[in-house]
Image (cartoon, rainbow, N blue to C red):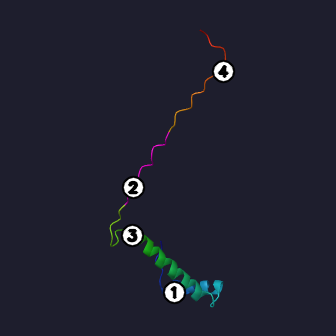
Amino acid sequence: MPNLGGAEWLILIAIIALLFGAKRLPDAARGLGRSMRIFKAETKGLVGGDEPNVITSAPAPAEPVVEPAPVVESKGTSES
């Protein structure tokens, strides 16, 4: 990535101001700051925050109860 000097930054800011308008730039910067703050807070827990990241496993699901099928007697001729 190329290094940007002072003149490049001024040109870049002027182009952004022309595209979005001077009235929308503070709102855009405020929204960007909020999203960066939220992102930082969410990733802080992932990368060794104050509290250790403890992953607890969910308990194993209970075994399904299988009831035996009812015995059906047939009414037919019996062989005896």
What residue does disc 3 label? 45
The residues tagged by marks 3 and 2 sit, at their Cα atoms, a distance apart of 18 Å
Q: Looking at the rendering, which quadrant does residue 69 occupy?
A: top right
Q: Nearer the viewer, mark 2 or mark 4?
A: 4
Q: Check contact, mark 1 vs mark 3: CB within 8 A.
A: no
Is 58 magenta? The answer is yes
The residues tagged by marks 1 and 3 sit, at their Cα atoms, a distance apart of 39 Å
Q: Return the mark for residue 75.
A: 4
Q: Position of residue 17 (x, y in %)?
A: 61, 87
Counting residues from the start of the chain, the first of labels 1 and 3 encountered is: 1
Q: Nearer the viewer, mark 4 or mark 3?
A: 4
> Which of the pair 18/28 is nearer the observer?
28
Q: Name the amino acid, label 2.
A: Ser
What residue does disc 2 label? 57
Counting residues from the start of the chain, the first of labels 2 and 4 encountered is: 2
Query: Could you tell me which residue is drawn at 39 percent across and 70 percent down?
Result: 45
